[in-house]
Structures are given as structure tokens and as C-alpha cells.
Image (tube, helix red, strand yellow):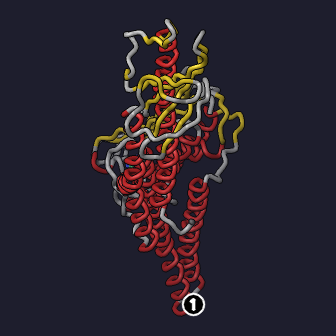
Amino acid sequence: MNRLSIKIKVTLWYVAFMLIIVLLVLTFILSISDNLLRSSSQSQLKSIVEKSLEEIEFDDGALEIDDDLDFFQNGAYLSVYDKNGSLVYGRTPSDFTGNIAFSSGEMQTVGDGDQQWYVYDLLMPIEGYGDIWVRGVTSPTDSEGSIQTMKGLAIIALPFIVILGAVGGYYITKRAFRPISKIIESAETISGGNDLSKRINLGSGKDEIYTLARTFDSMFMRLQQSFESEKQFTADASHELRTPTSVIISQCEYALENAKDLDETKEALSVVLAQSKKMSGLIAQLLTLARTDKGSQILNLELVNISEIAEMVIEEQRFLTEDKHIEIQSQIEPNIILRADQTMLMRLLINLISNAIAYGKNGGHIWVELIREEILIRGIVKDDGIGIAEEKLGKIWDRFFQVDPSRTAGKSEGMGLGLSMCQWICEAHGGEIYVESVFGEGSTFYFKIPFTS
Ligand code: ADP
């Protein structure tokens, strides 16, 4: 049974049910109508015989039968016999051969399958004459015959009905299951050839199978996206790590083979140190990002004074502005306290302000603002630097995306990971971050963090 396809199984099941139901209904209908017809022709015969008794009397030494009495009425034959069983009046049907004993008040059935008769006798004492028998004979009505014909027809037609039902049912089931075959086909192609770009594409039907196909399609889409971003991430990460690694190797080789004095060795070592710091920063960021991806980077929530953090970060970052003579102005509402992850909030502000410095113009300005609103904190980091071209605005949140990698020279960890980290931090706190920028005029980053994250 398990080897049969689901289509055959469904067809077999409902053909079996259909057969049982048709048989039950047919048996029920036929037996009810059979009984109804039989009892109606028998009760008619009975009443004819009973009524006829009133028409028979004994007068002047002879039996007298009223003129009203019809010896053939409604398909029933009437006959009167004396107590010895000799016919006195009336007649029986010409082909009635039944030599059957009298039995008063009992409905008797005689004859074979082809020709049947109902016989009903009544014994009546007639004063002065003695007992007489009145016998009524009738044959089952035509309708009863049609019931028999119907039975025969039903028996012949039933196998055809079942075959027709089975074929039609199989066809309908096959049609209904066609989408399933498509789903199986696509799933097999995907798992067999690792082609995650394949979709079932059933269309816009509303039933369960269409919904299932759409669910699969969106699952395939998410799988494809996550596989691709994973691949991209690995490729980008190894690319970013390769540059500092090759610099370290070449500096070490140079120092070992060519360094003539301690100064040259120290110079090589300081390059090695700078590149190692870059790598270490990158590895730390990669680790955090990998944890956010897995969902295992848990926020360490505590009551945090974000105003103090902002002031502290601004002070720290001021050192980096000296080369470019950038002025940082701020308006921080004091003592804004919320439940948040202190390290993450610090990272958010450092990333935004260090970007504003790195991509700010010489002698430019940076504006940092922190405002307490009813249910959230609104932060703004604005600069009048190089700005971001409109077509690049959507991409800056992607990992490893840099509009111009050569511009990050002033940043120690500039690898295109900062803003994607900022986005994760805001979203993990239930907030959001977005940017407005005009190329050549400057950028403004806005973030909102609700008090109840
Ligand atoms: P990066 O390490 O390169 O700074 P980020 O993720 O912090 O990486 O930023 C991604 C890119 O967005 C940057 O390379 C830069 O091109 C652009 N960007 C970010 N902040 C600014 C800003 N304030 N002004 C102009 N461009 C910016």
C-alpha cells in the first residue's frame, strides 16, 4: 500500500466509499419502494374481497349476487366457491394455475419469478346455505415489475458508474496534485544541483497548495540570500585580511634580510604593529558581526546615562579632528538615562562621529545632538564633508561597502563595517537609523532609540 502513489490511494479510498454509499442508497430506495408497492396492491386486494362479502346473500333457496359486484376490478379477479371448493360464481385469471388451499384471512403468494400471484381468501357463513369461500387473485402491479427491472439495470450499471467515478476521480486528483509534482521537481533540482536561484513559481492561486508553494519560494529566497551574503562575507573578510597579512610578511622578510641597523628594523616593526592592530580591529568587528548574525550577540542591558557617554566620546574624538581643523559642536540634553548596552551605544557614537571626521572637509564642522522625546531618544550626527552620492546611499549599510576605500586612510578600522554595526545596534535596541546626504555638501545621520527596548 505504501508503494502506491497518493493519487491512486485517494482514488481508491473514495471509489470504495462511493461504492458503499451507492449500494446503501440503492438498497434502501429499492426495498422501500418494493415494500410500498407490494403492500399497496395487497391491501387493495384485501379491501376488494372484504367489500364483495356485502354483495352476497341467500334468498329463495339460492345464492344471490348483487349486480353491482364486479368480478374483475382494478386488476383483481373475484371468485366464489361453496364449502367443497367448487366454483359457484366469478373467475380466476386464465393463466392462474395455482392449485392452492383456502386459508381465510391470509395473504398468500404463489407462482414463480416470472409470474406471481397474490391470493386472498375469506370464509363466510351464509344463513340457510352454509359456508362459502370468496377468493381474490391479483398479480403484482406493473410498477413492481419496473422495480425489478431497475434492480437489474442497477446491477449492470453499477460497475460502469464505479469505473467512471474512478477514472474521473483519478483525473481530478491528478490535476489537484499537479502543483505538488512541480514542488517536488523544484525541490529535487535545488537539492540535487545546489541551484538556490530556482523557484516553484506556481502563480497566484489561493488554495493550500499554492500557499505552500509560495512559502517554499520565499524560504528558497531567504536561503539564497543568506547563502550569498555568507559567501560575500567570507570573500570580503578574507580579502580584507589578506592585505595586512601580506604587508606584515613583506615587512618581516625585508627586516630579516635587508635591515642594516636597529632603526630600519624598528621602522619595519612599527609597520607590522600598525597592520596587526588593523587586523585585530577587523577580527574583533568580524566576531561581533558573526555573533549578531547567529543571534548570539546578546545585549548587556543596564541603566545607562547616554548623555555622559556622548560627551565622553566627543571629547575623545576631538583629538582626531586636530589634523583637519574640524570643529565639533554639540547640544546634548543632560542625564538622559535608558536601559541599553553601554559598549554598544559607545560604539554607535564612535562610529558615527569618527566617520564624520574621516569624511569631513578640512576646517569643516560637525554637529552632534541628543534630544529626549516622550518615548525615545533622538540623535543627530551631522557634517559638512564630502557627502554621499544618491545612488550609493542605500549601500552604505552593507558590510564592507566603502564609497572610496582610499578615503579611510585617517581611520584605524576603516573597512566598511562601521555603519552595518551601527544599524544592528539601533535595531537590536528596537530603534532605527537613517541618513540624509548631499554629495559635496555633507551628511546627516539620524538615529532613534526607544526608552523601552
Ligand atoms: P568605513 O570603515 O569605510 O568608514 P562604514 O561602514 O563606517 O565603513 O561606512 C561605509 C561607507 O559610507 C564609507 O566608506 C563612506 O564611503 C561612507 N560614509 C560613512 N559615513 C560618511 C559620512 N559622514 N560622510 C560621507 N560618507 C560617509
- Taking the view exactly as shown, the residue that stands out farthest to the front is 61
**Residue type, numbered disc 1:** Leu
Q: From the viewer's perspective, is residue 233 above or below residue 266?
A: above
Give whichever of 334, 288 is nearer the camera. 288
Q: From the viewer's perspective, is residue 14 above or below residue 231?
A: above
Could you tell me residue 348's position as x and y percent? 55, 44
Give whichever of 220, 303 is nearer the camera. 220
Q: Mark 1 points at which residue?
A: 256
Q: Residue 375 falls in which quadrant of the image?
A: top right
Q: Residue 178 falls in which quadrant of the image?
A: bottom left
Residue at image coords 29%, 41%: 438
Q: Provide the secondary structure element on which disc 1 rests.
A: helix
Question: Quick one: quadrant of the N terminus?
Answer: bottom right
Viewed as shown, does residue 41 lie left or right of 302?
left
Neighbor class of circle 1 (other Cα within 10 Å; few <14, some 14-19, many 20+) is few
Residue at image coords 49%, 57%: 12
Q: Residue 196 falls in which quadrant of the image?
A: bottom left
Residue at image coords 39%, 64%: 186
Q: From the viewer's perspective, is residue 58 above or below residue 387?
A: above
Give whichever of 360, 54 is nearer the camera. 54
Could you tell me residue 222's position as x and y percent? 45, 55
| Numbered marks: total | 1
